[in-house]
């Protein structure tokens, strides 16, 4: 494995008008205690005896960033916490990309990279994953980066949604180490891999940005907490560009409680993994199923004839799965989340009936 001793300056790719950007200075970032007469808040806490909900929350999200950092041996300054990982995706694109810039993505992959780029009128350079194995096409990525200097941000996703598999670490490192441009690795499903993902490489690879979430293994999709590990200088900029109070007190309280329940999270995760295995085995008994792709996440990509029509029929039976057939290389593929045991059994029974 190549070691990378060089410090890369990813801030050179920040949109020029954001360099040295002066943030809105929010009241609760400046002062958190004292006789607080600075933010036109209501002095009475009407609804909660537990949380001072009449006060704005800590705009710096210090407690949560500290905890999220500690989980990976990082300082609070290397952590951004936001409203789902979608906030990190959106902020990163806004920081690095305008209409003359581009992001590079490897389809089929998570759709929000494209959507957030389109919000900024940012271009999208696509380097498809290799057919069927869904591995990164590293030479094609290198060629695209060389041909497109307008690419300011690269998105990799591991485990990848909707294909479900982790990307090869060496392949990701090759991409990261052969460019100075920032490379985001979206690790929304990393807990299901039982590994640290690329967290250990944050120390050596200064153009690496990791995105994670409490929405999946931590079972807090309803709370909207995502986070990002990145070099401190970039995190400082994200803190500047985000909306002043992007996380509310209740969400933060819930996230902090959840992070203290790591053992419970791991127990639930092991259950999901065993259910995933059971679902694979029972799906194999459905004659119409042509292929179940290997998964390192909490969902399966399944190839089955007439997937689009089948998805609609499943909806009629109140079973909702995602048809991914329109995506690159995913003809007749459904993405199926691992549900509760009874839900999985109902799905397989219904699939058998509909494809008989
Ligand atoms: C790869 C990937 N990244 C990010 C997200 C968004 O997660 P969050 O709920 O944190 O916004 C998802 C959600 O499905 C995802 O699959």
Image (spheres, rainbow, N blue to C red):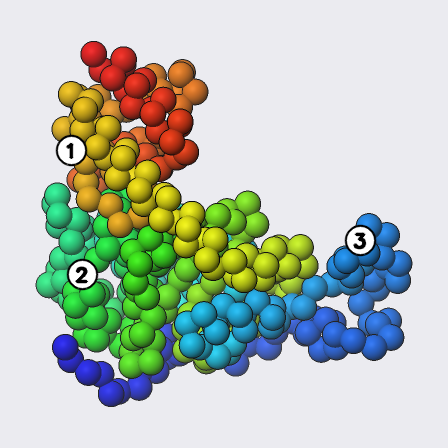
Q: Position of residue 215 (x, y in %)?
A: 47, 50
Query: Quadrant where the N terminus lies?
Result: bottom left
Specify whether 353 is left or right of 270: left
Give the answer, above or below, for where 323 lies relative to 252. above
Please state which of residues 238 and 72 is positioned toward the viewer in this rendering: 72
Label placed on residue 168: 2
Q: Which residue is mark 1?
A: 291
Regarding residue 338, the answer to whether it shows in the image is yes
Residue at 36%, 22% in the rendered image: 346
Query: Quadrant where the C terminus lies?
Result: top left
Quarter residue 197 falls in = bottom left
Please state which of residues 241 and 82 is positioned toward the viewer in this rendering: 82
Q: Are marks 1 and 3 in contact (CB under 8 Å)?
A: no
Q: Which residue is mark 3?
A: 48
Q: Position of residue 328 (x, y in %)?
A: 21, 41
Element on which disc 3 rests: loop
Element on which disc 1 rests: strand
Q: Position of residue 355 (x, y in %)?
A: 22, 15
Residue at 65%, 68% in the rendered image: 59
Circle 1 Cα neighbour tier, 10 Å, few/some/many (<14 / 14–19 / ≥20): few
Circle 3 Cα neighbour tier, 10 Å, few/some/many (<14 / 14–19 / ≥20): few
Q: Position of residue 6 (x, y in %)?
A: 26, 87
């Amino acid at each position: 494995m190549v070691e990378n001793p060089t410090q890369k300056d990813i801030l050179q790719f920040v949109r020029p008008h954001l360099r040295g950007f002066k943030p809105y200075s929010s009241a609760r970032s400046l002062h958190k205690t004292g006789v607080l007469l600075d933010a036109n808040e209501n002095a009475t806490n009407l609804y909660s005896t537990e949380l001072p909900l009449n006060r704005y929350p800590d705009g710096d999200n210090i407690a949560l960033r500290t905890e999220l950092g500690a989980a990976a041996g990082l300082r609070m300054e290397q952590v951004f916490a936001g409203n789902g990982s979608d906030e990190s995706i959106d902020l990163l694109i806004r920081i690095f990309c305008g209409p003359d810039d581009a992001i590079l993505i490897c389809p089929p992959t998570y759709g929000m990279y494209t959507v957030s780029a389109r919000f900024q009128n940012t271009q999208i350079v696509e380097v498809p994953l290799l057919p069927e194995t869904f591995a990164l096409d590293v030479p094609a990525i290198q060629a695209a980066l060389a041909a497109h200097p307008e690419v300011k941000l690269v998105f990799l996703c591991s485990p990848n949604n909707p294909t479900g598999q982790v990307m090869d670490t060496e392949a990701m490192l090759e991409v990261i180490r052969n460019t100075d441009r920032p490379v985001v690795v979206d690790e929304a499903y990393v807990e299901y891999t039982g590994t640290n993902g690329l967290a250990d490489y944050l120390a050596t690879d200064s153009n690496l940005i990791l995105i994670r979430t409490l929405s999946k293994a931590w079972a807090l999709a309803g709370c909207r907490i995502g986070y990002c590990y990145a070099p401190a200088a970039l995190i400082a900029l994200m803190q500047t560009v985000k909306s002043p109070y992007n996380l509310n007190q209740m969400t933060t309280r819930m996230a902090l409680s959840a992070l203290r329940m790591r053992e419970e999270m791991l127990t639930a995760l092991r259950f999901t993994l065993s259910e995933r295995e059971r679902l694979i085995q029972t799906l194999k008994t459905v004659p119409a199923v042509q292929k179940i792709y290997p998964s390192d996440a909490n969902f399966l990509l399944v190839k089955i004839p007439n997937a689009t029509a089948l998805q609609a029929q499943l909806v009629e039976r109140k079973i909702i799965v995602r048809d991914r057939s329109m995506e690159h290389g995913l003809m007749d593929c459904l993405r199926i989340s691992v549900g509760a045991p009874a839900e999985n059994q109902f799905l397989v029974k219904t699939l058998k009936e509909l494809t008989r």
